[in-house]
Amino acid sequence: MNLIIDVGNSWVKMAVYNGSQILHHKSMQQEDLKGEVQKVIRAYPKISHSILAAVTPVANEIIDILKKNSETHVLHSASRFPFKNKYGTPDTLGLDRIALVAAATEAYPNTNVLIIDAGSCITYDFLNAKGEYLGGAISPGIAMRYKALNTFTANLPELEKTDKAELVGNSTDTSVHSGIINGVINEVDGMIERYRSEYRKVTVILTGGDGQFLSKRLKNTIFAHSNFLLEGLNYLLELNKH
């Protein structure tokens, strides 16, 4: 069994895999990670390998617990990847993006794939049919856009995303919702169309915390995968086992 841990900017995701089957999945705040790791190790004593991918620092105590109970791989830029990395600055490439591209390599071989991860940031990552990762784009996520309008202006409120965002806002609140939600939808749809105009037969994967929210609103054909990053980390763990 494999224990998969993804430490993101906002949330930590943890999963237990038996082969390709997911047995356990949970999201939490980082301050709860130590206790949850201890619980899952007790609940699944057959865990033999672990992988940790962190975009923010993780306490050494947690890494020590993992290493004490399993063969642990801490993902880094020199880990073994199943794709050719043509990113100009490979040492700065986010581990979450690496895991997403790895998942695309396994799930969609010999295919042009655009992976869109709608989380704290919205990332776009492109893998071509030759198995080459070319790069992509990073833009602010939905929650970040709401926070930015409040932080960098004197009078705009900090709101939560809404299911209803009319084109024409008739109040300050509805105008903010219109600008952010419709802006993100048009951005994502526009990026998909740009990629499909540049490359033939692009498969589009949408994942991340806001993935399901956006999938209902996009006009382009996409595949929504809520656990795509975890699947990529499980694949990378198998690839990096000694």
Image (cartoon, helix red, strand yellow):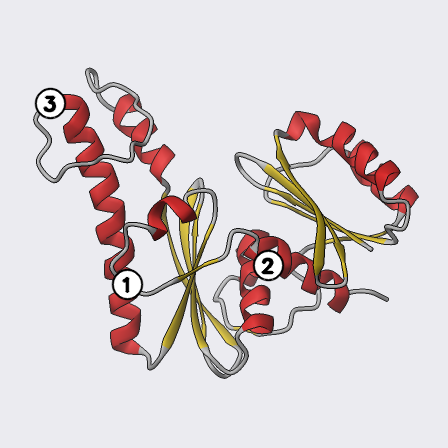
Residue 234 point in image, percent of width and height: 70, 59
Q: Which residue type does callout 2 highlight?
A: Ala
Quarter placement of the C terminus: bottom right
- In this picture, residue 125 sits left or right of residue 62: left
Task: Tell me the residue that label 1 is attached to.
Answer: 220
Say what secondary structure mark 2 lies in: helix
The residue beneath circle 3 is 171
Looking at the image, is 228 positioned above or below residue 120?
Answer: below
Residue 69 percent across, percent down from the top left: 90, 44
Decide which of 183, 221 is in the foreground and name it: 221
Judging from the image, what secondary structure is the residue with disc 1 in? loop
- Cα–Cα span, label 1 and label 3: 30 Å
Which residue type does callout 1 highlight?
Asn
Mark 1 or mark 2: which comes first in sequence?
Answer: 2
How busy is the neighbourhood of tag 1: few (under 14 within 10 Å), some, or many (20 plus)? few
Q: Position of residue 112 (x, y in %)?
A: 43, 77
Q: Disc 2 vs disc 3: Cβ atoms closer than 8 Å?
A: no
Task: State the residue at coordinates (55%, 57%).
Answer: 228
Q: Which numbered dot is residue 99?
A: 2
Q: Image height check: is 4 above or below 126?
A: above
The type of residue carrying mark 3 is Ser
